[in-house]
Structure formats: structure tokens, C-alpha cells
Amino acid sequence: MNRIIRIGLTFLFALVFSVGVEAQLSKLPVEKMSDEQLVTLLAQQQLLGLTPARFEIEASTRGLSQKQILIIREKMERMDPFMISKTMSQLKEKEIDPNGMRLPVRSQRPDKKEVDSVLQIFGSDLFDKEGISFEPNLSLPTPSNYVLGANDELLIDVFGLSEKTAKLRVSADGDIRYPNLGPIRVMGLTVEQATSKISNALSKIYPAIRAGQTRVAVSLSQIRTIRVTLVGELNRPGSYALPSLATIMHAIHAAGGPNEIGSYRSIQLIRGGKMIADFDLYSFLLKGDLSTNLLLQDDDVVRVPAYKKRVAVKGAIKKPAIFDLTEADSPASLLDYAGGMADIAFKEMVRVKRLGATAREVLTIPAPQLSQFKLISGDTLVIDSLANRYSNRVQIGGAVYYPGEYGLESFTTAKALLEKAQIKESAVLDRGVIRRYQNDLTPTLVQFNVKDVLNGKSSLALQKDDSIHIYDQSLVKQYQYITIEGEVNQPGIYPFLKGMQIQDLILTASGIKDGAVLKRVEVSRRIRQKDQLADSLQYTVVRTIDLDSGYQVNATIDVVLEPFDVVYVRRSPLYRNQSNVVIEGEVKFPGKYALRSGKDRISNLLDRAGGLTQFAFPEGTILIRNIYTGNTPSDTVIRSLKYALLDANTSMQVPETEADNKKIAEADSIGVKLISKQLNSQQKRVALDLTEALKRPGTSADILLEDGDIIKIPVEQQTIQSFGAINYPQQITYKQGMSLKNVIHASGGFAANASKKDVYVLEANGRVRSTTHFLGIRFYPGLTRGSEVYVPFKIRKNPLTKGELVGITTGLLSLAGVMLAIINTLK
């Protein structure tokens, strides 16, 4: 499909640039084009998506013949909409410029990039915006001044004593031929003149017309297409086929409007070699005046000359832009075109930046002289904004109820402004300040006594831009707080309130906890010796308070707190929360048990649980204990699962590459995830020998229990599992006296990449036993039921490259040379 479109485009472009545009379009073999080629052509000409009536007008404008238009319409009706959409998408992907053919067609102008620093020509957006059209309304009554021409179709209605209706087209000679009457020349006549002439002619066959008993009405049923030429500074000049009701504005819009140097003030209509209208676009844009927007006729010429004077206006203006001016325009009229100055504009004067003969110039125009100043092309009017200053402002802020800005005329003294702003009760009355600017705008501070000003003891006059600030006592003092810690429901920091007692603070902290002791409540207090300069070894005063009497107001204890005190409520040494442990698996009464003391052991718990069942496997008992020193799983447990996570049915090759090493490393990360899934972040597995604990209760093997311990006693296991670098990892039935070598042999022996010296065994209770060595002899650990045998892989490091070997050799030789030089120097 892409190849077909590419061939079609090549064919079309060859035709486009070989001859004149209109001539080559009329010669295009549209009847032989494929659907893709036809859609491409219509996309180039922007003829897709138009109504049938609009399509016929636009296609005729682009030089296509009526026969070609008819063929295209028939093909388009048969086309698959999906194919059209697909072809358009392919054209968009190839970034084919739809304006690549330089044809005199009506289309939207390319979008202009919006740049804040670049002003647009006033009126240019009229031709850039989509949806704006100046096409004539063909459904309106025919204008009385409409001049008839060839191909106009007239509707002649005879009514009264005689009834007849006829549609007659004006021939190329300018005549219409009424049945049984002969030709009537109407070319060059208005509709009103043609109606009178046709009535006189029809009176020959309808005598009642003269008596007024029969009347004749003439109207246009279909208008003709006229050919108009647009020249000059337009975006798309050329020859256009337009409806005969088109005006100058319609023609200019069809040509995309004036270009960058085209005039908006003098659009000339030339007919028969004479200029019959000079259309000013600003009259329409600013006043809505279309009196000179005349109807066009066949062979009219619309000419847009270059602008004569352009002046830019920017700054504090409502419509900053570039304006076309006439010789009669002044800065005052230019400001009117721009909508007038903005509200924030400095209206006393306007600055003009001018391009002088040898350098740029700046001129200043006072406001009264705007109507007399003469502008030249290239000038830029700059409207300044008002300066950010006030001529009569004073301000007040701080500890007042109504801060803000005030007018100096109403408040000439500090007393009047303070009384209006209303001083707060927390205000510092001994001192206030005024921020004042000197004549050179240097800021200074003027201090005053607020109380004296309010009492009238001192008078303080205000000046422009004075700013009074009243200090707030709460903001000039350090924030005061008290702290309570220990056995209260909500320990923390609380605001200090004068007169607060220790009982009030405890209640503010939502009371004490169940295990709190009120006999030994401590209060630590800062030492405040402002007048003493010598250092002291004592930094804090600590008082122990007995609050066992409770929180009564009439209590004998009356401790008033001071700022920054810290209160400690201690916990009773005999108070303990219930401690629980869980035993699961093969015991007679599994479940949760409360510890009776801190000396309960495994054996005690088993006695309370009714002892082991007949299916219990004590050698596989595990203990899970909460830890609070971190949340990383035990390295031993991770290592024990490292190779168990590898595929037991796959014999892994020797890792000689980084990818292989990475695969082994991923086993570690998977092990971490597995352990984290089985145990929470505050649990670890503790190795336990339950058999020894039951044989020797009270010894170190009989572990003391802690809160949160979980004991799991599994059923008896009959197998041993092998993992890692062996040829066939599997489960093997355990036999009394079985050795590690027996397990390796039953699993197919060591793999070629096995690390035999690092073999270890993980017993069912979590204990890890490693291979030992003595005098070069390797001693493998023994086995018990439920054990797991792990054979690690050898992890080979990547060999040094030739470049690395050369670098190391060169470094060693250089070092040797330096050493020899040092030795020779010492000799």
C-alpha cells in the first residue's frame, strides 16, 4: 500500500511541476487514478470533508473541469471510509505538506507561532482563525443591484389570468430564450431592469400584462461562477472562481488575506482598467462599515498594494499590535484603534521609539500633544504603567486589630492612626517603630513610646509611605512549654499555662496508665540565676513528688509548674503485662499459654500442654522468637535456603560469566524474600534441641521462654533432602547410620562444579553443621532424620583480559624501575 501511494505521489508531483498549475490539473487523468492516489490528490488540495456544493466550487477554483469533478464525486461515493482514514494517517506519518503544491486555492493560512515578544499585525487574525468565512449567503433574496451575466439562471413566474413558470439560463451571448417569444438580452442588466424588460417582452404573448391582470416576477434560481484575479501582497494571489454574489472581503479571505507587507487600508477593486473602489479593512474591523465592500463581477481585479505606514503600539494598552496608518492618522487615532490605554497606564505622556537615519531615537510626547504629533513608518509607541508607589499612603501592622493601608489626609498623626487601627491588649506599649524613607529613599527607623503617643504626652506627625509596627508580647518572648513523659496515656509537649499544677498536666495528658506509680513523680526544672556569672556544676533542680492522694483540688500537694518543666511518671517495678507463648504441632493441648514467671522453660510448657503425642518428632522442633534489634533475616537461615531455591531437577553448569554469577546472586535475593514471607520482620529462628531439654530439664538446653515465642513440633520425618551442586537432587529415605556420602551417592554424586569443602547440613531443628578439615582430611557432618544436605556451587571469577594483564605487568615494571632508581641513589 505504501508503495502505491509513493508511486502515486511521484506521478502527481511530476505533473504538477511540469506545466502551469491550472493547465496541469485539468489534464490529470482522474478516471485512471487508484483510490489511494485520488485521496492523496484531494488531501493536497484540501478538498476532503466538503459539502457537495462547496466541493464543486472549490474544485472549480483549483482548475478542475466539470467532467473531472463529476468523476471524482462518483469515485468518492463508492470509496470505503476506512480506506480514506488509513490513507490520511499514512500521509500524516510521512509529513507530506498539504500546501506543497503552489495552487491558487482557498485554504487556511499556516498557523502562526505565538511569541509573546512579537506583535501581530492588527486584523491578521481575521484570516488565521478557523470557522470565519465571508462567503455570500445564497439563501437570501437577490440584491436589486445584482448585474446579470452568462450562466445565471432566472426563475420567471407569470401569474394572474395566465399561470406559467420557467427557468431560463443566460447564454454566453447574454440572452434568455423564452418559449414562443425569442431571445431577450439581459446581460449587463440588474435584476430590477431585467424584470421590466422581460415584462414588456412577455406582454406580446400575454396581453393581460398591460392591463395589470397578469404580473411577472423574476428572481435568480442559480447564480453563475465568476472569474476574479487577485494580485499584489496577498498570501495566495491568483485567479479564483467565485460565486457571482461574492464581494471584495470574500475574495480577500479566499486568498488568505494580506501578507506580511500587504496593506489593510487600501484594497483596490479594478474593473475595466479603472479603480472603482478603495476598500479600507479597518472601517469594517473598527466600525463595521461595509459600504465600499462591493459585489464583484467577471474579470474584476482585486489588488492589495504594500503598506505605506506601519506603527507598533505596546505596553499598557488594551490591544497591543502593529497597525496600518494613513497620512491623516495621529497617535491619538492610533490609541483609539488599539482600544485605548489600559487602566494601569501612565497617561501623562507616551514614549515613541523611532528608527532614525543613523541610530535609534526615543521621543517623549505629552498627552495634550498626541493629536498633533506626526508618526512615521517603523515607529513604536510605548505606553508605560504607573509606578508601584503611592502618593498618600501610610501603613500599620503588628499587634493591632485593623492592620493595613490608610490615607495620609485622614491620619496625619501616629495617635490618630493607632486609635483607628485599635491596639491589641498583647501589644508592647513601651516601644513602637516607624519605618520611614528619607529624601534619598534611604530607609530609617523612628522609635516612639506607644503609651505616650496614645496619652498625648508626645506628638508624632506622619509622612508619606510611613509604616508603623507595634510589637506583640507573645512574639517577642520564647515559646513556653512543659513536657510530661512516662506512664501517661499521651506523653509529649504541651503549652505552658500560668498557674498550671502537676495534677493539671497529668489530666491534660489523658491520665495515667495502669502501671503508673504516683508516689515517685519527678519534676525537673531549669536553674535560673540571671545575676550569677560564676559557673555551677548543678544544671537542673529535680523534685520528687508524692501524688498518691489523687487529683483533688484540696490535696496537700500543691506543685505549681514553671515554663520548661519536665514531669516523669514512673512505672511500678512489680507491674507486668501478661506474657504469652504459643505451642503448635504434636502436643496434646496445643494453643496459647500465659507465662507464670520469667523462669518458665520449654519443659514446663510441655508439661502444661500434656506432653508430646506418639507422632511427635522432637528432633525437628523449632523455636521462633521476636527480636527488636533489626528486621534482617538471619544470615545462617538465608544461607541454608540459598541453594534450595535453585531448580532441583536442573544440573547447573559452572558459572563462568557475569550472567551466571548474577543467577547465583539472585538465589540469595530470592532467599531473603522467602524468609521474609515465612517470618515477619521481627522474628528469627532459634536452634533448639528438644530431646536434650527433656532429658535434662533446667539446663541450658531447656531454654527460658520469652513473650511471643512460638514452638512448632512437627510429625516424625523419614527422609533427607539433597540440594545444590549434585547431579540429581532428591529426597532419600533415612536409614539408621546413613552418612553424608551415602546421600551424595544416592543423588548421583557431586556435580563437576561442586564445592566439596563447603558442604553443610541443616538439621530439622535449624542447627547448621559444616564440613571440617584436619591435616588435609575432610570430615563431613553426620545426619539425622529430616536433615537437608547442601552442596554449594563453585563461583569462578572472570579471567583477566589481555588489556588488564598488560596494564598490571606495565605497572609492576614501572614500580621495579622506581625501586632500582631509589637503590642506586642510596648507593
Image (cartoon, rainbow, N blue to C red):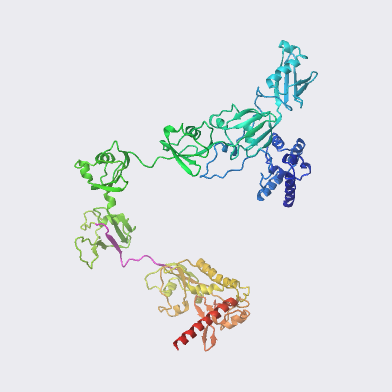
Residue drawn at x 29%, y 36% as measured from the top left: 409
Spot occupied by residue 728 in the image (x, y as percentages of width and height): 63, 76
Q: Residue furthest top?
A: 211
Q: Residue at x 40, y 40 (%)?
A: 386
Residue 270 place in picture, x, y as percent? 65, 30
Query: Where is residue 727 drawn, in percent x and y?
Result: 63, 78
Residue depicted at 73% across the width and 15% down the height: 200
Quick check: can you spot residue 157?
yes
Q: In screen coordinates, is 348 left or right of 673? A: left
The count of marks equals 0
Q: Is residue 553 above or below residue 689?
A: above
- Along the viewing direction, whichever of 123 and 207 lies nearer the viewer: 123
Furthest residue in direction right, as rendered: 180
Using the rendered view, name the quadrant where residue 513 is placed: bottom left
Give the camera-side residue of 526 and 358: 358
Q: Provide the residue span drawn in magenta.
A: 561-582
* Residue 506 shown in magenta: no
Q: Could you tell whether 278 is left or right of 772 in the image? A: right
Which quadrant of the figure has residue 558? Answer: bottom left
Asked if one can make out residue 798 in the rendered structure from this viewpoint, the answer is: no
Asked if residue 754 is positioned above or below residue 674 in the image, the reply reads below
Q: Quadrant of the C terminus?
A: bottom left
Asked if 748 appears above or below 631 in the picture, the reply is below
User: Dividing the picture into quarters, in which one does residue 656 lie?
Assistant: bottom right
Q: Nearer the viewer, residue 521 or 233?
A: 233
**At 55% from the left edge and 75% from the top edge, which residue is drawn?**
717
Give how far across and how far down residue 732 sits, in percent. 60, 77
